[in-house]
Image (spheres, grey):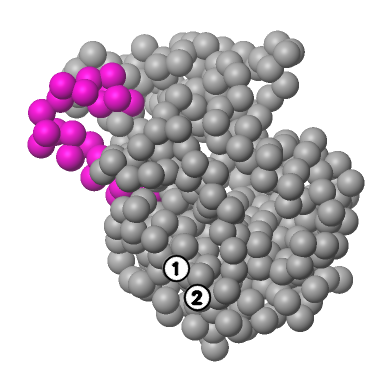
Amino acid sequence: MTTGSPMVKDMQAFSRSYAEARDKFLAAAAAAGLAVESHAHPLRGRDGEALAMDVVRDGPADASRLLILSSACHGVEGYCGSGVQVAALRDATWRARAREAGVAVLYIHALNPHGFSHVRRTTHENIDINRNFHDFSRPLPVNAGYREVHPLLVPASWPPDDANQAAVARFIAERGEKVWQAAVSSGQHEYPDGLFFGGTAPSWSNTTLRGVLRAQGRGAARIGWIDFHTGLGPNGVGERIYAGRDDAVATARARAWWAGGGRTPVTSIYDGSSTSAFLTGLMWNAIYEECPQAEYTGLAMEYGTQPLLDVMRALRGDQWLQAHPEAPPEQARAIKQAVMDAFYTDTDEWRGRILEQALESMGQAVDGLAA
């Protein structure tokens, strides 16, 4: 499937700005004869451009089987995910395969367009939307570990001084990198100016996505979802992370779809097999609430870029910059470049590996939905 597909060679599907990525997505949809539903964001982009969550459906409105392909849950990660979506829309072979299997494909481009445009992981509210899907009428999870590390994460000066670096190094040496990762990244709701903030109310992306799912998914009996991410694991390797409730039947189904007989294993945050820490408020919660009639099977495709501590340092720098807009332009550019490098490897070799693995996972999902 992958070797003969135009998609795996489409390096031009990737972009160097959100505006360019959106233009390519809209053009690919138009060339495919597909309508675009655009949900305008209330703010403008880095270069003054309009922002939107753009939605394209390839397949009949009454299809019983639906595959969702989404990008830019974590803004800057959209430089990868958008490229996959554009390449897929341009690939007649892939589109025909899904159509012949009776699977409609829903492309949700730029779940977090503001972060995508501004080269940030979070939304304009500083919210990590993949920690934002809670019932906010109930008490929110408490991340006691984050309380301890918050003072270290965003120091008064950047780069961090020797004392800060020594304190971080001591924490990791004494407790381990996994404990540091969990404390920092699991999600927190107490520090709006901190990292991995899950918010205290639904974000714009949360409410907008829910509307899309209700409109597009309520008629489907079976829904598969691949959400494209970057920033964890070995460079260029796409970890298939189960994205759903802690349910043995659904987990087994995801592994039957995507594990490739053990060749492409599916990991989980529930059994500790994933490079990700255990997280709360994840986006896939919405599918159970907005499309309760559907059998749901989900995957986060997580592509590696840099070592974990380098990625976290880039995020720390970006959070410092957010609090210090007066930073010198040269320093601001260096911080933003570090964020880009942490979530996107700018080589054709990396892009080729991303496309090949994406296409494979998409084909596996179509086969699973059609079975």
**Magenta part of the chain:** 319-343
Residue 323: in magenta span: yes
- Tell me which secondary structure the magenta stretch mostly adopts: helix
Report the front residue among 105 and 173: 105
At 65% from the left edge and 62% from the top edge, which residue is drawn? 57
Residue shown at 34%/58% (left/top)?
Answer: 20
Indicate which disc residue 70 carries: none
Secondary element under disc 1, as helix, strand or loop, is helix
Q: Residue at x 56, y 27 (%)?
A: 203
Residue beneath label 1, please? 27
Q: Residue furthest bottom?
A: 4
Quarter of image, res 277: top right
Three-letter code, disc 2: Ala
Answer with left or right where residue 273 lies relative to residue 173: right
Question: Which residue is identified by label 2?
Answer: 31
x then y, percent, for residue 169: 33, 25
Q: Are marks 1 and 2 in contact (CB under 8 Å)?
A: yes
Q: Eyeballing the image, is 234 above or below 204?
A: below
Residue type marked 1 = Ala
Q: Is residue 356 visible?
A: no
Quadrant of the image for the N terminus? bottom right
Q: Give the left or right position of residue 299, taking residue 66 as reference.
A: left
- On the image, the x and y values in percent for residue 286 come to 72, 37
